[in-house]
Each structure stands twice: as C-alpha cells, then as structure tokens.
Image (spheres, rainbow, N blue to C red):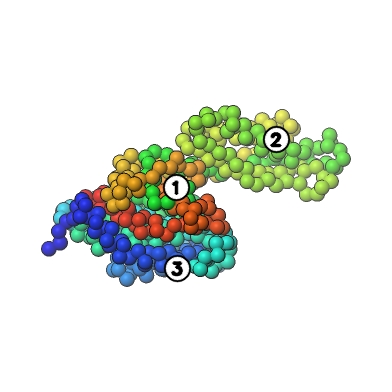
C-alpha cells in the first residue's frame, strides 16, 4: 500500500526524483531553445509538450487561441496551442462524496519566444531566424515538464488535484485571458507561476508577497497642427515641435509629480511626423507605455499624461487626441501563497536558496490569473556572470544558468504538495 509522504521524507524524495531527470529537463530546454516560436505560433512547442504528457499518461486538453492572420486564410479562426493537463491525487480524502477534489491548485508555464535574432553562439542556439527564447520561457516549459513528471509519480501523496497550464502568447498579453476563458481557473483554489530572472542572484528564489510586477498600459497621442513652408513657421503649427514639448513634459510627471518612493515609468517609444525636410509637419503621433506599481498611481498617471498632452498642445495651438490601450494589471503575490513558496524553497533547497528582489516594472499576464484566484509568481534567480548569464531579459545575448532548472522543478513540486497537504 502506498503511504502518504510528508516533511523531510517527502522533500528528500522530491530532490531524488527531480535529480533523476535533471539531464532530461536540460535537454528538453535545449530542444525548445533551438526551436522557438512567436506568440500565437507555438504549434511545435505545444506538440512537444503534449508528446511528453502522452508518454507519461497524463490527461490533457487543448485550449484554442486566435490563429495568426497569415495562417488564417480559408481556415478556422482559432488554433489550439494552449494545454490544460490534470494530475489527480490519490491520497486518502482527496475527493468529496461527489468525486470533486477537496482542493485544486494550478501551476502555469508560458511557452512563447520573442522576435530577437540570437547572438549567443551557443551550440543549441535558435534555428528559427529572427526568433529567440530571449525571455527564458523555454526554461519555464522544461521546469514545468520536470515538475509534472515528478508530481505524476507522487500522486499517492496528493490530497486533491493539480491542474497544469501550458500557456501560449504571454508576450502579446493575450494568452492568460484565452486560458481563463477556456475554464483554466474553474474550481482552482490557488495558482503558482515562475519566471527565470536575470536580475536575481543565481541559486536563489524570490517569493516576496505584494506587488512584484507592474501595471502595463499603452498610450498613443495624435497631434494635429497646420503644415506650412519650412521657411515660414509663423504660417503653420509645427506638430513636431508640439510632440517634442509633450515628450519633455511627460518626464516631469515622474520626476516632479510622483513620490521618489513610488515606482513608475513613462516611456515614449515611437515618434512619427512630417513628410519632407522643407515642410512644417501638419501632424505627428507618439506611442508609449506607462508602468506603475499601484492602481491609484496608474489612474493618476493616465490622467496626467492626458492632461499634459492636452494642455501642451493647446498652449502651442495644436489639437490632440489621446488614446489608451489598457494592458495587464500588476502581478501582486498573495501573502499565504508567497509564504508557502518561501517555505517550499527552504524545505527542498535550504534557507540559503531564499533570495530577495525589489520587483520590476516589466509586465506579465500571470497577473490576469491573480485577479481571480490567490497566487504567487516566483522569480527563479539565474544571474551568474561566470557563465555569461548576466544579460537582461529580451537581450540577444540572454543566457541562463541551467543548474537552476531542476531546482525550479523541485520548488514547484514542493509547493504543489504542500498546498494539497
Ligand atoms: Ni517572460
């Protein structure tokens, strides 16, 4: 008869079982790294994950997401790349009288790559020209497959159900919403996600509670001036000069209108205007992103950007249109889920593996899950200058310390077991 495992015995077994497949985890990661796919194109990636789940006899279903435009002609509008897998625990009392799990937790890994041309020179560098796993999502898939493989072997210790989400399209902010629409969170009590992170010291895990990643919003400012001959500025309204004033004035929102203790960033990433060097531009537009830590700050910054654009334009005689495309909310870790993650790190790797990190103004659509259920998003520290793993996320030189992959699997397994204990 299978005995329920707990405490140090369970942690020791998790270390053993994951260590047994560490070579596989690294080779899965390298295979995925060689074959990166962009958001909404994760076809081969998804097939690879499903082949592993099939091999281990783990039930799963496909989630449909929007099909990319270039593949859409004459075919269904949706393509299935997201995966929801289920591991049913077999510990005593895992199900109620109606057969429902007494507790259900979810683990999530994202699967997409970025439009970056890899320059690492690694043996297993991307073979897909112009596409690279420069954010480490290949590592997330490999760590999660390792965790799934081991959790499947530990079914007898699981009091409830583990749902595993392999999510496409994180980089375009759409995947989590598709997964949720497909019922990924139905009946889920708590969710865990992890991100390989180059700013966190290698060998450590950052699991702090509270805000961890930013509210990410996108804005566009269209300026309508009056074109004129380049030699006669007084006959026109120069939209380029207005745009330049707006760009400068927006900086003041952060430097003079925001507490130095409150993280916020406004970046104008694009500026377009004008048609020829001897013509005063009649129109111009800017696009940019706003990153904030708290919802109240987000609201006041949006109001501030709109006000600056409006007042500056009108002061200089131009008209303006402001538009906002709301992005994902902030990643905010639930206190109990975060503490369970910290405890899991200590149990399976020891106190020295608990790291710290102030958080980042980068965005993550994991936040969409946390809007609906309590969850924790863990940063898996992979900073290691000795092996070149010190470039930022999204860099063409991005590398990770692969020694963290098995550790990442161990922490996910331990968290899942503890949450279902
Ligand atoms: Ni990422």
Q: Nearer the viewer, residue 239 or 128?
A: 128
Q: Quadrant of residue 284?
A: top right
Q: Which residue is mark 1?
A: 200
Q: Which residue is mark 3?
A: 31
Q: Which mark is residue 245?
A: 2
Q: Is mark 1 within 8 Å of ligand 1?
A: no
Residue shown at 32% from the left, 59% from the top: 147
The span from disc 1 to disc 2 (Cα, nearest Å) is 37 Å
| Left or right relative to 76: residue 229 | right
Q: Earlier in the sequence, mark 3 or mark 1?
A: 3
Picture quarter with the N terminus: bottom left
Residue 297 placement (x, y as % from top left): 50, 33
Residue shown at 35% from the left, 56% from the top: 407
Q: In the image, which is nearer the foreground, mark 1 or mark 2? A: 1
Q: In the image, which is nearer the foreground, mark 3 or mark 1? A: 1
Q: Is residue 368 above or below residue 389?
A: above
**SS of the residue under disc 1:** strand
Q: Is residue 125 above or below residue 331?
A: below
Q: Is residue 264 visible?
A: yes
Q: Earlier in the sequence, mark 1 or mark 2?
A: 1
């Amino acid at each position: 008869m299978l005995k329920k495992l707990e405490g140090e015995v369970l942690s020791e077994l998790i270390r053993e079982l994951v260590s047994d497949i560490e070579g596989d985890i690294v080779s899965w990661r390298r295979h995925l790294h060689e074959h990166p796919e962009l958001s909404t194109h994760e076809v081969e990636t998804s097939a690879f994950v499903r082949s592993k789940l099939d091999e281990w006899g783990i039930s799963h279903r496909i989630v449909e997401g929007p099909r990319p435009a270039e593949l859409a002609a004459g075919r269904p509008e949706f393509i299935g790349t997201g995966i929801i897998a289920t591991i049913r625990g077999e510990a005593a009392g895992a199900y109620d009288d109606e057969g429902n799990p007494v507790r259900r937790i979810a683990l999530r890994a994202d699967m997409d790559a970025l439009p970056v041309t890899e320059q690492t020179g690694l043996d297993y560098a991307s073979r897909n020209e112009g596409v690279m796993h420069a954010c480490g999502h290949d590592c997330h898939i490999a760590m999660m497959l390792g965790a799934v493989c081991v959790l499947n072997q530990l079914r007898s210790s699981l009091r409830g159900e583990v749902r595993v989400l392999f999510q496409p399209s994180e980089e375009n902010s759409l995947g989590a919403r598709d997964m949720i629409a497909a019922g990924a969170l139905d009946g889920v009590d708590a969710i865990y996600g992890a991100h390989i992170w180059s700013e966190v010291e290698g060998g450590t895990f950052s699991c702090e509670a509270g805000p961890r990643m930013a509210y990410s919003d996108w804005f566009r400012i269209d300026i309508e001036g009056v074109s004129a001959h380049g030699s006669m500025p007084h006959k026109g309204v120069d939209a380029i000069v207005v745009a330049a004033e707006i760009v400068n004035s927006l900086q003041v929102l952060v430097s003079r209108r925001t507490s130095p203790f409150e993280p916020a960033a406004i970046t104008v990433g694009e500026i377009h205007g004008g048609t020829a060097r001897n013509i005063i531009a009649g129109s111009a537009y800017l696009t940019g992103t706003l990153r904030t830590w708290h919802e109240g700050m987000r609201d006041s910054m949006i109001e501030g950007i709109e006000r600056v654009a409006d007042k500056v334009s009108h002061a200089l005689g131009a008209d303006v249109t402001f538009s906002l495309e709301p992005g994902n909310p902030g990643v905010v870790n639930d206190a109990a889920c975060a503490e369970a993650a910290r405890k899991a790190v200590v149990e399976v790797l020891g106190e020295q593996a608990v790291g710290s990190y102030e958080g980042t103004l980068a965005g993550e659509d994991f936040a969409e899950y946390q809007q609906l259920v309590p969850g924790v998003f863990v940063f898996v520290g992979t900073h290691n200058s000795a092996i070149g793993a010190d470039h930022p996320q999204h860099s063409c030189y991005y590398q990770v310390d692969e020694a963290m992959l098995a550790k990442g699997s161990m922490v996910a397994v331990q968290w899942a077991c503890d949450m279902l204990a």
